[in-house]
Amino acid sequence: MVYSVDFPLNVIGVRGVMARALTIVDIIKTLNQSAPHAEGLLTLSGLKGGTHAAKYFKSILDLNDSNFASVLAELFRGVGWGILEIECDPKTYEGKIIVKDSFIADVYGGSEQPVCAYLSGYFAGYLTEYFGKNISVREVSCKATGKEVCEHIISPAPSGGTSQEYQMRGVAR
Amino acid sequence: MIKQPNVILGNDDLLVTMGKKGEIIGFFYPRRDHAQHVEESVACIHTGEKLLWTNDNEWQGIQNYIEDTNIVSTKLYHDSGIRISILDLVHPDVPVLIRRFKIQSQKKLSGKFFYYSNFNVGETSKKNSGFCDTDIHLLVQYWQNYHIGIYSQPEFNEWQIGKAMDTIWWTNSKYDMEDGKLQGNKEDIGNINNAAGWDLELEADGANEFVILIGAASSRRLLYKRMQELSKLPLEYIFEKTREHWVMWLSRKQVIKIPGLEEYENLRQELFNAYNRALLMLYLLNDREYGSFVAAPEFDSNFEKCGGYGFCWNRDAAEIVLALKHSGYPDYCDMFFKWCIQTQLSDGSWFQRYWLNGDIAPSWGNFDYSTQIDETGSTLYAMDVYYRILEGLKKAEFLEEVWVSVLRAAEYLMKRTKSGIHESCMDLWETYYGIYTYTNASIYAGLMGASHLAEENEEAGMARRWKKRAEFVKQATIDRFWLQEGYFAKGVINGKLDKTIDASILGTYVPFGMLSAKDPLEKDMIQFMIENIQKKLSVPINLGYGIKRYENDSYINGNPWVVTTLWLSEAMFTFALELSYEKESSAPTHENSYEKEESPEEQVKRLTGEGIKYLKWALAGATSTGLLPEQVDKSTGSPAWAIPLGWSGSLILNNILLLDKICRRKAGNQQES
C-alpha cells in the first residue's frame, strides 16, 4: 500500500517525489544497457544533485568540517538511499564512503561491474561544492558485484593533463 | 534530443543551422547531408559569480537575416543588463563560419567570455581527437579526414579540451567553465568537448568584441592555412564580399512586380521578401557538386520521431528545380537531371530517397509494394517541363542526354499500370500501401511527358503507346476514384476504396495537369475538389486557415502543413489565371449553377483573394527569419517540424510567380480599358 505524505513532497528545498527504488534502477539499467557513456552520464547526473544538496545545506546551516559528512549521511538515510559511513579528511580531501544497503546496488541484481556511478557523482558534486575544489569519487567495490557493501574512494581531482587521467584509470601507457 | 533550427546559413561546402539564440545546431561539411560535426556550440558569459549560457531561457532574442543575404543577425538581451549582438556569416569561398560577438553591459562587468563546443567530428562521438595549438591559438578536433577548428580575434587566452561524458567529470569543458577559469588541458581523445575563454572587462555601458572563426577542412594543414589566411582579412571586407555574393546571386532571379495589392497592407513587400528568402534558402539545400537537394537540413538523425529529412527525394527535388527554373535559375534542372540519370535504378524507377551523392538512403521502401511510383512519374514530368523551355542546341542535347533514362522510366510506369491504375505501392506521405489518386496523376503526367519527349525524338510508336496508357490511367482514375461528393478518393487501401479526403488529390490538377480547366466537366471537378478541401481540411490558427494533409492525420499531431496550404493556393491561382485567359478568348456559355451566381471576373477575384489568404497564412507560419517550415503547430501557430522545408520553398515561389502573373494581367487589362 502507499503511505500518504504531504503533497507536494519537499526534499532539500525543492519538489520531491517518492518512487520505488526499482523505478530509478530501471532507468539506470536501461542507460547501462543502451546508452553510450552511460557511466559518465550517470556520474554527471549525480554531480548535479550533489552540488544542489551542498548549496542548499550551506544556505540553511553552517556547513563545516565537523558536520558536512553527518549532514550528507542524514540526507541519504532520510530519503532512503542508503546508510553512509564517511571518512574524509578536509585537509587532504582524501577518504572513503561506505554505502550500506545502497538503493541501487540492492535492487540492481548481479553485475560484473559496479553500478552506483550515480551515487559516486552525487558524492563528488556534494564534496566539490563544499570544499570548493574538484573532487573525484570512484566506486571501487559494489554490493551488486557480490561485495558486502559499496565503497567509494574520495580523492582530489588531478589538475589537468591526460597522463594523470590515464593513471587514474590504472591504464599502463 | 530533437532541436529545430530557426535560421540557416552557409556556402557551397558548408551548411550551418542555428537556434533562435545563435546556438549552432548543425554544421554540415562537406555535403548538406553529411557529415554533421556539431552536437552543441554556444557562447556563454561568466559574470564573476555565475555562468550565463546564451541559449538559456533567461535571454530574450531577436533574430533575422541581413536583407537579401544569408548573413544572420541575432540580438540577445539579459535581465541583468547584458546585451549581445551576434553577426554570423559564412565566407562565400571557404567553409568557415565567422561569428562576431559584440557584448555590452549596463553595469560594470568583470568576468569571462567563453565559447563552448561539443563537436562530433565525422558525425561520431567516438575516436575523436582534439588539441589546442597554443602557439597560434587554434583549437582543433578531428576524425579521419575531417578537421574542425576554432580560431579567434583577439586570441583566446584560456582553453580546455576535456571529456564530454565521462566519470572524470572535472575535465569536462562544460563544467570547467563554471568556476570562471579553464584548466588549459591541451589534448585528449574520445568523446571530447572544448572551450575557449577570454577576459571580459566592461565598464558600465561599455562594449567588447570577439570574432570567432569555426572552420572545416579535409586536412590539418589546410585548416591551419584557411584560418590564418582568413584572419588576415578585415571582417568588414569579408562581410561586404559575402553580402555581394548573395546580392549578385539574387540578381539573376525572374523579376516580379505584383502590382495592385494596395488593399493588402505590406503584402507586396512581404512577398518580395519571401521570394528572395525562398531562393536564398534553396541555394543552401542544394548540393552544388551533384545537383541534388536535401528535403530539409537533418534534425532527427536518429530517426527518433520520423524518418529524417536530410536526404534527396525525387518528388521534392523535381518540384524544387522546376520552381527554380520558373524563378530564373534553370541550371538547377540541368544538374538535377544529370543526377537522376546516375541514380535511376535498373528497373527504370527511382528509389524512395538518396544521399546527395546518389547512394541509396535508409529506406522503408525497398520492395515493389513499398516503393513510391509517384517519384518516377514526377521525375519524368519534370524532365519534360524543362525540355519545353529549352531552345536550340541545348534542347537537342538535353533530349539526347535523358532519352535512355526517359525510355526506361516510361517502360517502368507501363509495367506497373497494366490495369489502368498503378499496382500497389506506398503513398506520397510514406504511410500507407495501396493505390492512390495522386500517384496515378503523377504517372499520367510522367507518361504524357515521356510521350512528348518521344515525339520530339521521332519515336512516334512509343509516343503513341505512352500517351494511350496515360489517357487510360486518367480515365481509370476518374472512373474508380472520383466520388459523387465532388472530390477524388484518396485511393484504395487494404482492397477498399478509401474516401478520406487528402489534399494531395490536388495533384490531379497542379502540378500534373491530369484535369484541365479548359474542359468544362473537368473544370467543375477542379472547383468541387478545391471547395471540398477547404471545407474538410481547414484548421483555424494564426488568424486564418491552414490545410492539413488529410482527415484524421496523426503525424506530428496532425498539424496543418505549409505544403498542402500552398498547394491549394497554387491551384486557386492557376485556376484564376486560366479563367482570366478563358474570359478573353471566349464568351461565357457555362451552364452549371455555380457560375450562374458568379461572373468569371468575380470568380477570378474570389479565387485570387482566397489564395492570398492562404499565402498570408503560410507566411505567418514562417520563422522569425522568414524560413518556411513543413508544418505549423495547430495549437501555437509556430513553425513546426522540418525547418526550412525545400518543398515549402518551391511552393511559395510558384505561388508568388502565379500571383505576379495574375496581378500583371489585371493591371494590363485595367490600363487597356
Image (cartoon, grey):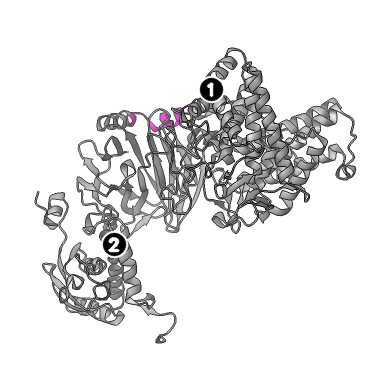
B98 magenta-colored: no
Residue numbers of the magenta segment: B230-244
* Image location of residue B581, percent across then percent down: 80, 29
Q: Quadrant of the N terminus of chain B?
A: bottom left
Residue located 57% across and 19% down the image? B399
Q: Nearer the viewer, mark 1 or mark 2?
A: 1
Q: Are marks 1 and 2 on the same chain?
A: no
Label 2 marks which chain's residue? A
Left or right, residue B77 beside residue B374: left
Residue located 63% across and 57% down the image? B552
Q: Quadrant of the C terminus of chain B?
A: top right
Label 1 marks which chain's residue? B
Residue extending furthest toward the front:
B419
Left or right, residue B65 beside residue A161: right
Q: For marks 1 and 2, give the CA distance.
A: 54 Å
Q: Relative to residue B295, is residue B303 depicted above or below?
A: below
Is residue A53 in view from this perspective?
A: yes
* Image location of residue B309, percent across then percent down: 48, 44
Q: Residues within 10 Å of mark 1 (few under 14, many from 20)?
A: few
Residue located 24% across and 73% down the image? A105
Q: Which secondary structure type mostly characterizes the magenta part of the structure?
A: helix
B232 magenta-colored: yes
Task: For mark 1, give the secondary structure.
Answer: helix
* Image location of residue B400, percent across then percent down: 55, 17
Q: Residues within 10 Å of mark 2 (few under 14, many from 20)?
A: some
Residue B379, picture quadrant: top right
Figure label count: 2
Name the residue carrying label 2: A32
Name the residue carrying label 1: B404
- Check disc 1 and give the amino acid type: Val
Residue closer to the observer: B582 or B401: B401
Task: For mark 2, give the secondary structure.
Answer: helix
